[in-house]
Image (cartoon, helix red, strand yellow):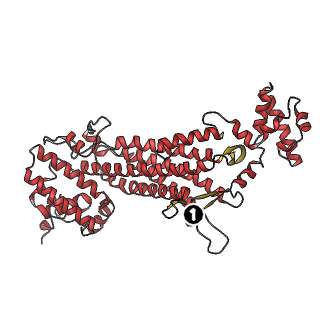
Amino acid sequence: MSQNQFDKKSQAWSALFSEPMSDLVKRYTSSVFFDKRMWQADIAGSLAHAEMLSAQGIIGQDDYAAIQKGMAQITQEIESGQFEWKLDLEDVHLNIEARLTELVGIAGKRLHTGRSRNDQVATDVRLWLRSEIDAIAALLVELQRALVEVAERNVDVILPGFTHLQVAQPVSFGHHLLAYVEMFARDAERMADVRRRVNRLPLGSAALAGTSYPLDRERVARTLGMVDEQGNACVSQNSLDAVSDRDFAIEFSAAASLTMVHISRLSEELIIWMSQNFGFIKIADRFTTGSSIMPQKKNPDVPELARGKTGRVVGHLMGLITLMKGQPLAYNKDNQEDKEPLFDTVDTLKDTLRIFAEMIGGQYNAQTQRKEGGITVNAPAMQAAALKGYATATDLADYLVKKGVPFRDAHETVAHAVKAASESGRDLAELPLETLQGFHASIGNDVYGVLSLSGSMNARNVLGGTAPVQVRAQIARHHERLGMAA
């Protein structure tokens, strides 16, 4: 075979070239072995495009029927593992198109009418990511439910609330967990918002300038479910932007990074709470590992890895932003580098959400018909820790303010009381009334109800506060919002 007769079937564009691509360049530029995961999106987009071409009279009904039949066989081959993915064909798109042409002949060659790989890949990534966002949204619900279930069992458990990792005020452990429910609820809102911008059709923009064929792009959008809440087709309005835009991938990665940051914060607390110096919780053994040399250890590997994987996801976000920052319009080969970080972000986030929902909430046991495992709460250890840091000092200051003492004066008075209690090795609630009255004459016997941990917690009976009555109200709200049984 001469140079001019090299295998022109190996690339869709090879007729222009006088020599084949080197094997090194094939490996360097190929994406098929990571972008093949988008095969379902590619077939769905192609079928919607073919249906529209047929409806517009651009290809015949027989061609459309042949394309449908060929795609059905390709689907079966991929699902059964019989499909041969070829490096020479570069990516998922050309692999599927080449196999289609093998199966149905000239009809397969007509499929690409009115489109380019530029708008095709942009469509495929959006369809694939839309499906993944839906899966992530469901996992976020499961994690929130797990947290709500644990919170509901621990509304009256007293936890030392911290600022600067110093004991600050007593809070309900249930209230503390619901803080993470709020974070993950915002993450779900962000994902839903991102999904709306992901769900827009680039197909029909062709390489960069649109096409001369009379395409009905809105028809394709409706076929693919790319519609808004009112059912209106969501179609990109500028062909140059449509083929080169990766804002949606960056925006998703930003939302994913925030979700992982929230998981990392929760991980840090689980790690601290599980340590012997705190002993607030135990994590089920199946989520921990031992030491190769110290037989007494149970290491919180899952939270630690999640904390580490957060850096990985945030790194992908930075990589995608950097990828796009120097690109002129329109499509550039750089954009092939969007997929691996995007795919890994999705995989990491989904795996992390799935394992955290089970680690926190436990696993359903069909025999006992209840969830087992998850985290075990050591309420006495939490309460003992809350007693160590004069957590009710602010309550004493509030008590004095209600007696007419200016807050700044009350603050100074309580500081003296805390100093005296600390020097005597006692809690504020353990100081005799006479001693307390020595700091301010308005202090009466009723102060001891204020200085108790439960009294402090119950006093925060304001919307969003830690009083158990407020926590139970929030739990009821989350039950309704998340579709949980009452």
Residue 420 sits in which quadrant? Answer: top right
Residue 290 spot, x, y in % from top left: 61, 70
Residue 293 sits in which quadrant? Answer: bottom right
Residue 189 visible here: yes
Residue 371 spot, x, y in % from top left: 53, 58
Is residue 472 placed above or below 92 in the rendered structure? above
Is residue 409 placed above or below 248 in the rendered structure? above
Q: What kind of element bears circle 1?
A: helix
Residue 442 sits in which quadrant? Answer: top right
Is residue 103 placed above or below 318 in the rendered structure? below
Under mark 1, the amino acid is Asp
The residue closer to the viewer here, 241 or 424, is 424
The extreme top residue here reads 404
Residue 76 spot, x, y in % from top left: 23, 64
Residue 294 visible here: no
Location of the N terminus (image quadrant): bottom left
Tell me which residue sits at (38%, 48%) in the image.
249
The residue closer to the viewer here, 417 or 122, is 417
Horizontal relation, residue 328 to residue 445: left or right: left
**How crowded is the residue under tag 1: few (<14 C-alpha within 10 Å), some, or many (20+)?**
some
The extreme front residue here reads 368
Q: Which residue is mark 1?
A: 301
The residue closer to the viewer here, 179 or 105, is 179
Horizontal relation, residue 216 to residue 466: left or right: left
Residue 402 spot, x, y in % from top left: 77, 27
Tell me which residue sits at (8%, 44%) in the image.
57
Horizontal relation, residue 401 to residue 159: left or right: right
